[in-house]
Amino acid sequence: MGRAEINSANQDGPAAATRALADWIVSIGSDDIGAVPRTWATDAVLDWFGVTIAGSREPLSHILAETMGEEGTGPARLIGRANALSPLNAALVNGAASHALDYDDVNSRMLGHPTVPLVPALLAISDMQPVSGRAFLEAFIVGYEAEVLTAEMVGEGHYDLGWHMTATVGTVGAAAASARLLGLDAEQTAHALGLAIAQAAGLKSMFGTMSKPFQVGKAAMNGLLAARLAKKGMTSRTDAIECAQGLADTQSNGFFPVEMTSGGNRSFAVEENLFKYHAACYLTHSPIEAARRLRELHSIEPGAVDRATIEVNKGALTVCNIDRPETGLEIKFSLKHTVGMALSGVDTGDLDAYTDATAQDDALRALGRRSMVVGIESDIWSFGRVKLDLKDGSSVEETQNVGVPASDQPEQRRRLLAKFGTMSEPFLGASRTDELAERILSLNEATDASVLSELAQTS
């Protein structure tokens, strides 16, 4: 869609995309959000707390907590710590901590991590004013939907141009969720979306550095700020997604209108959430699973591999193809190294596996030199195939796709609870971890959502 068509779209008045999204955010009723999306949202919140508690101990989180703490204290608690900051600063620190390990959830329609910009903003509001657990979950579901719909309106071209969807579109989602929880009307919400888009930023070129999670923290902070300013009367363009020189026009190769009809008999985007069980970029997960499966089926040891070919959707080549990682953080964005770890029997779900020493391990580097990454055309964004040519002359291969949402929700929750325990117990202890998990799982019935941030603090 060109500039003339975008200008034409502006003449549609209330039916224009940004205003339609704002109307939907405000108008969708509590009864339209059924038990299924609430269950999926609860799982997402559970997973967020686990990765954030563990992520709060990362160097990035220490730097941010110390720096923002220099501006003074406030009512909004920091997860995994004992102190509290202003709501905006807490959203920044908690948002960055939740993405510091790159172990947080994903949605394929968004090409990013939907939960991490949302929960920090909603927790900050819950520490500012009374918020029920039911309202918290509803705002989360609405913000999640807004992220995905905005991502679809700007299209994959936004991501292909180098924008970090979690940071850019996440800012819009955080504004939408905050607007819902703060009770903004449709006009205020449209301005909040515009104010969020005016701040939306984040680059894929920063992957493998501390700037990647920092961008996510800024998304949470800026989205919350946008909603608070709009509530007090600050204005913006109310067609900021689709207007000339707006989000789609400047940061993508087109504008793609979508229907705002989720709810009722139609599923919510949160029901397509994908959870991580490897602590690395999600686009490494299908090849990791393929490599693990080959090791299990054929009892293959790394030394028996003459050549490894890793096939992925070509889009992954600009995301997680660091050829020779030097640090533990860079491992998370290296197809060669994560596949080598899986073939070597390393637990890729173990946070302690991603160290500088692992990055510089001689055996893994040698396997990396015998490996080749190939980008292929595929309609499956999360496609992964590993082919091994063995030194005995034989060859084996395995294909995996982790981009399919779980069909067994109870089993998903079991796995998430196990992951949550692993992430939280070292810092909270077993008793407090169990209590926090219980409170999260009963969040829809809770009268005070702030109990979550209270329980997630260390003494």
Image (cartoon, grey):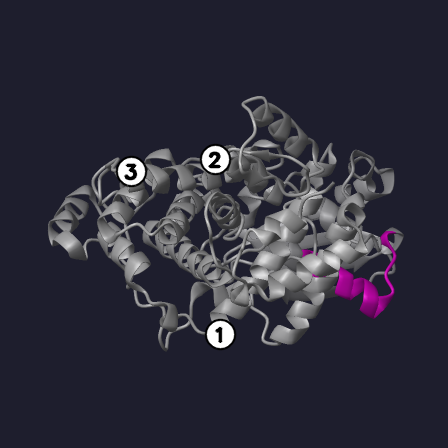
Residue at 73% over, 51% down: 423
Using the image, tell me which numbered label, if any, was put on residue 232.
3
- Element class at badge 3: loop
Using the image, tell me which numbered label, if any, was put on residue 35.
1
Relative to 182, 186 lies left or right: left
For label 2, the crowd category at 10 Å Cα-Cα, with few meaning under 14, some 14 to 19 and many 20 or more, is: many
Look at label 1 and name its amino acid.
Ala
Relative to 9, 293 lies left or right: right
Q: Nearer the viewer, residue 412 or 375?
A: 412
Q: Nearer the viewer, residue 285 or 193?
A: 193
> Which one is earlier in the sequence, the residue at label 2 or at label 3?
2
Residue 147 sits inside the magenta stretch:
no
Query: Which is the main secondary structure of the residues drawn in magenta?
Result: helix
Give the extent of the magenta segment. 287-302
Residue 351 is situated, as x and y percent measured from the top left of the image, at 76, 46
Q: CA distance from mark 2 to mark 1?
A: 31 Å
Look at label 3 and name its amino acid.
Lys
Using the image, tell me which numbered label, if any, was put on residue 88.
2
> Which one is earlier in the sequence, the residue at label 3 or at label 1?
1
Residue at 67% over, 64% down: 438
Residue at 20% over, 39% down: 244
Residue 218 is situated, as x and y percent measured from the top left of the image, at 48, 35
The answer to whether residue 57 is above or below residue 15 is: above
- Among the 4 quarters of the image, the one containing residue 249: top left
